[in-house]
Amino acid sequence: MAKMPVMEAAVKILESEGVDVAFGIPGAAILPLYKALSKSSKIKHLTMRHEEGATHAADGWARITGKVGVAIGTSGPAGTNMITGLYTCLADSIPIVCITGQALKANLHKEAFQAVDIAEIARPVAKKTYCVKEVAQVPQVFREAFRIAREGRPGPVLIDLPLDVQRGEVKYDPDIDAPLEIFKPSPDARKIRRAVEMLLKAERPILMMGGGVMLARASEQFVELAEYLQIPVIPTYMAEGGIASDHPLYGGRVGLQTNTRGGNKLFLESDLVLAVGARFAERHTGDLAVYRGQRKFIHIDIEPTVIGKVFPADLGIVADAKLAVEALKRVAKEMTPKRSSGEWSKKAADYKRRFRRKMDFDQVPIKPQRVFKEINEFFDSDTIFVTAIGLYQIWSGQFQEIQKPYTYFCCGQAGPLGWEVPACLGIKIGKPGAQVVGIVGDYSFQFLLGDLATAVQNNVPYVIVMLNNGYLSLIRQPSKYVYEMNYAVDIGYGDGYGPDFVKIVEGFGGLGRRVIRPEEIKPALAWAVRESNARRIPVLVEIREDRDTDAAMGVSIDKIVERDPVIDIPADAPVAVPAAIG
């Protein structure tokens, strides 16, 4: 077995782990890895404008491809800049590997230039961190990093490489090396049977599809289970698109913010919830006494410590989501014939149509609801939407209609501002034939907009739809209603001190157009799609929206405060409910 530069061995491992793109920024302490990377014909490198952007781009690439994303940085501030991206991926269970350079081993304790213990700093926001101090350990550390990132509840891993370790040589033969085996726990057959018994006994059961179902690529099987048993499905926000919003069993969204009126109402009437791959996050549950009520909960998750973390389950099952759903389907078919649509299952479609929020506002400045009405009507079901955190994201969660899996992506728990620009880049690189649309706010957009230049340089086209109200509006809303103030949240609205976002995007090499009136929205979207795809660049549609519109929210799912008109159709009014599917 011949010796080779250890970083060439590391790159061979990246290639065999399915990595075909890396997002990073070179620096003096990581150049040996870049030297090896420059020889790879299988991995493309994109030079980002910020290391946090590199992690978010790797995050987006991982979400759309189902593989492990890779972000690379040098020593010191590069690693500390990656912390937010690591935290985001840990929170949302996204597998990425971050690789950082480090000072010489002998200088780690001497306050050397850009020498910081990034492995220790990153430990709370990663599944595993390494500072590799022996050259011979590098190949196995890289293999183990990818296994850990994938196995169980997925997440991020950080590998820190001192410069002298990177310069070493190692005996390595890529022809006799392969990715490590991934263990997927199967569900206990007795518990699966008990779960099906509970579902069949319940009068008003709900199947809750969590983000873990999407990570396991099990949404199709989940919907098949729902169709066989004719049970309504409530996807969590991280599972949006897992069941089509026009499916008769789609029950809407539950939560304090990204909710639908029909979803909350249906959930409150349920008597049993079977949740797969869900965390019961506080923005979903709200007041636990209301959320739990008298209903029973079956909780299935691959991570044992998630079960019971928020509240005790009546039945907890540790299992891979896909294996669990397939087992539920198999046992259900053994225990009962395929069920017909009944009064309870029909309520999903019934409530979706009867309990809505008004969207067809014609006023100027434009109401945000109207923006999403136009988005729903203009883009087809294959369009991939990317959004981050703010009132624009909450409105997206309340109003967007998503029909297919893996066409809606959001940073759920961590909520880092600026996520969309690099995430759009990573998602478009991961699925180059897709139409990618970032839904952004005027404030979040400013955090990592430098990576527009990365997209222009690498001919990565996508559309950005900005809802601009000149406010930190998600903070302005509680400031107004809870603290009775409007302090430090005004960032300008074209009144002399607000940014000119069209000029900013054009300055990076993209294109932009400003929209003032509702009837201008669709033509602007058509222009953006056409120009983006023709010129292979990001294109912005900035929509000046009403500054004073607030989103529907509440402290519990039974007390959502509606800030704008709603639509209630009486139960005895003629409402067309489609026949069951499946």
Image (cartoon, rainbow, N blue to C red):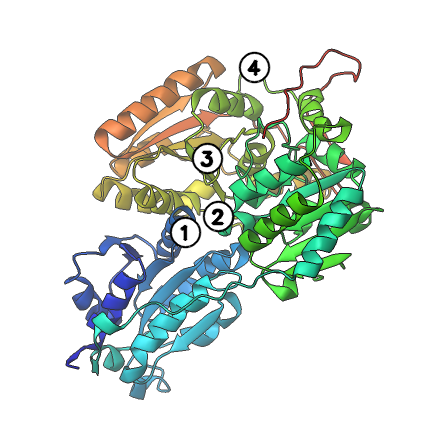
Nearer to us in this view, 34 or 185: 185
Dot 4 and dot 3 residues touching (CB under 8 Å): no
Q: Picture coordinates of residue 547 (x, y %)?
A: 57, 28
Q: Which residue is mark 4?
A: 363
* Amino acid type, callout 2: Arg
Q: Picture coordinates of residue 498 (x, y %)?
A: 44, 34
Give the foreground label among 4 and 3: 3
Disc on the earlier residue, 3 or 1: 1
In the displayed structure image, the side of residue 137 where residue 223 appears, left or right: right
* In the depicted structure, whether residue 388 falls above or below residue 232: below
Could you say whether the residue bearing mark 4 is in a helix, strand or loop? loop
Dot 2 and dot 4 residues touching (CB under 8 Å): no
Whole-angstrom CA distance, mark 3 to mark 1, is 22 Å
* Amino acid type, callout 3: Ile
Dot 4 and dot 1 residues touching (CB under 8 Å): no
Q: Which residue is mark 3?
A: 439
Q: Which corner quadrant of the image does residue 400 belong to?
A: top right
Q: Which residue is mark 1?
A: 66
Disc on the earlier residue, 2 or 4: 2
* Amino acid type, callout 4: Gln
